[in-house]
Amino acid sequence: MLGPNVAWYLAIAAVLFGIGALGVLVRRNTLVVLLSLELMLNAGNLALISLARHWHNGAGQIFALAVMAVAASEVCVGLGLVVALNRRELSLDVDTLSELRG
Amino acid sequence: MTGGSWLCLLAPLGGTIVITLCGTRIPRIAAAWIATTSVFVAFGGAIWAFLGVHSQHAPNSVGLAYAPSVYHQGEITTAWTWLQAGHFSVGLQLLVDPLSTMMMLIVSGVGGLIVLYSIGYMDGDDEERRYFAYIAFFVFSMLLLVEGGNLLMLLVGWGLVGLSSYLLIGFWHERPTAVAAAKKAFVMNAFGDATMALAFFILIAHTDSLSFGVLNAHLSSTQANLVALGLLGGAVAKSAQIPLQTWLPDAMEGPTPVSALIHAATMVTAGVYLIARTHAIFEQARTIELIAAGTGALTLLVAGLIALVQTDIKRVIAYSTMSQIGYMFLGVGVGGYANGMFHLMTHAFFKALLFMTAGLAIHALAGEQDIRNMRGLGRLMPFTKWCFLAGALALVGIPPFAGFFSKDPIIASTLNIGWYGYVFYACGLVGAFLTGLYTFRLWFLVFPGEPSPFVREHYHDHHGSEGAWTMLLPVGILAVLATIGGWIQFPPHWDPITRWLAPVAPSLPDAVASSTQETVTSIVSVLVGLTGIAVAWAIYSERKIAIPAAPSLRRLLEEKFYFDRLYDRIFYAPAVATANFLRREFEEPVVLQTGPDLGEATIETGGLVRRIQTGLLRTYVFFLAAGAAAVVLAFLIAK
């Protein structure tokens, strides 16, 4: 089955990862930061899967499944935090949440 | 025979364990009787072993004229193998032979009498049970020392007697002087233990064994000299000979029965036993053996001189003990092992007797020990007086008392060994004069005459007698032994002890004096002893001769030839100075300052590093991303 070259998939993954990283860095809303994180994870997944196909090695696909599981649990915790913050009527701006500074 | 030796060894140990485990559940007097009984059981075991050895002489001997070397050579009994490493193996062994049975009889016999005496002496002390546990433990240790079937067992006993001596000197632990004396005795003895251990290491390295037989093995002359020197170091420390003698007078801080048992009759004579037991190695290293004899000769003079100016009744007797052990060292050093062992035996009788009569006096005067306060005590304590006189005459060597028979052969035996023999001979005779002088100085100051006011004021009797019967009985028995105990042997006419010891420790031919030499020496030394007594009488009783002023000499003697001060300067003061220097220059600035310095440095570093902990999520992410980018970049460049 022919398709686009693996380089294209990797390029898309890199672009997605860049968008996600930029989102984490520049956005201040906690929810958007979480979304950007998901984007980075899925960019990683895309790279794993495309290379697994390229090398005919199933390990990458299995690893992608594991990443999904981790991502799901991370979202659970992250969204839980967001809900908790909201309930206490605290700001969702990450820059104001800096109680852990040294 | 071997059963007797095990019984002898283990009975006092059993006594100790029972007293310790029972604690306060038994009355004090029960503890005392347990200890006494256990030591007398040990004496029974010793007799059993003695009869066993005795019955094994050849049947063809007629009457008492045994030919030498027909006695049993001894038998080793092994309980189990105790230590094993490669070819080296040591068992828990006991040796039953003429020498060890003789020592067993002395230790358990005299020991039993002294423990019996302690019942009266220690009555009313706060910690009697502890005392009796210790003293039974001492008897066990001493028996282990003399019965040990190899050098390692001997060393174990050697160390344990040092320990029990330490415990008993410091028995009255609320007295700082007693604690200091105990510590001093232990440290000086530990020095001797160390040199002995070094000698054993040499033996193990060259022969792979520590059995007594290995001492006959051929060693190079250097090795033999080193081994003999190490053993001599142990003997000198344990027997309080110069230069390791200073602990013995201080050890008089212990209870008087302890002084009688440990620091007169048994433990301090262990050095003499050691030399007789290991005579094979000393004969390979004859120089060292003669050094032992010289040490003895020097000690008997120095101790005799110091005894002249002491004012504490126990210290006079303690210096006398050092002096008499000097005679024993002289005896075994020139090769007359039987002479040394015979004097060890008679000395155990009369010196224990002297200490115990002194104890009766001290007890009756409520702890007073200064002889200047004791004048005229004989009027109030006639029994003590006569027993003391028997001991004193035995000590000076006036016939027919015990010391006469045992001391003169030692002096006579020095005549045939070479020119230094004459020096030893002269030392022995001067020592005999000093013995007469200091012994009867004590006698004339304490017993005859009208009781002094101090004595009248402080004397208190024990229900009408001079002491409890437990104290008087052993004193009486020992007075009899001090009188007749020497009749066992009268060389050269009558020598059962020499023959008894011949299979184990035959005296060297050089050390056997001829009949004429014996006779002349006996006459001269008795005359010299009598002169000493006469001088003491003239000075201290009749006051016809003034005590020589000679303040510098007097000071020299009162300062004990400055040995204590010398050791203080050489060892104690530099050690303290070094310790103080290290404390000031090293411990306080380096060791003590390191902890706080480390803590402060950590806090400072933490203060610097905490600034990058901003709490801002996006900063962290930035550094994370930048780090990851840097790693990727590095990999790309490296490729």
Image (cartoon, helix red, strand yellow):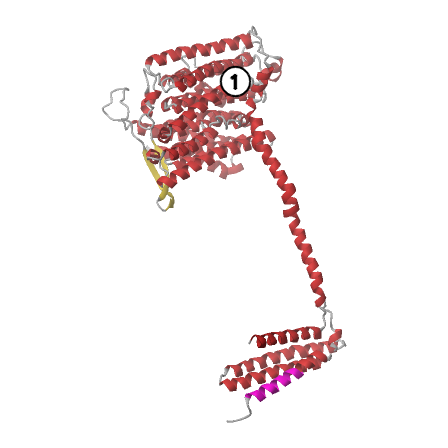
Q: Is residue B383 left or right of residue B103?
A: right
Residue B582 spot, x, y in % from top left: 62, 41
Work out whether B381 lies above or below B584. Answer: above
Q: Is residue B160 magenta?
A: no
Q: Quadrant of the C terminus of chain A?
A: bottom right
- Quarter assignment of residue B90: top left
Comparing A66 with B381, the one in front is A66
Q: Residue furthest left?
A: B60
Q: Is residue A13 magenta?
A: yes
Residue B420 spot, x, y in % from top left: 41, 20
Q: Chain of mark 1?
A: B
Asked if one can make out residue B235 in the rendered structure from this viewpoint, the answer is yes
Residue B493 spot, x, y in % from top left: 32, 15
Work out whether A22 lies above or below B64. Answer: below
Residue B265 spot, x, y in % from top left: 45, 25
Asked if one can make out residue B126 in the rendered structure from this viewpoint, the answer is no
Q: Main secondary structure of the magenta part?
A: helix
Q: Is residue B427 left or right of residue B126?
A: left
Q: Amino acid at mark 1?
A: Leu
**Label 1: few (<14), some or many (≥20) within 10 Å?**
many
Comparing A66 with B117, the one in front is A66
- Quarter assignment of residue B93: top left
Q: Is residue A18 left or right of residue B462?
A: right
Q: Is residue B637 left or right of residue A96?
A: left
Question: Magenta segment range?
Answer: A6-19
- Report helix, strand or loop for mark 1: helix
Work out whether B83 lies above or below B241. Answer: below
**What residue does disc 1 label?**
B305
Q: How many marks?
A: 1
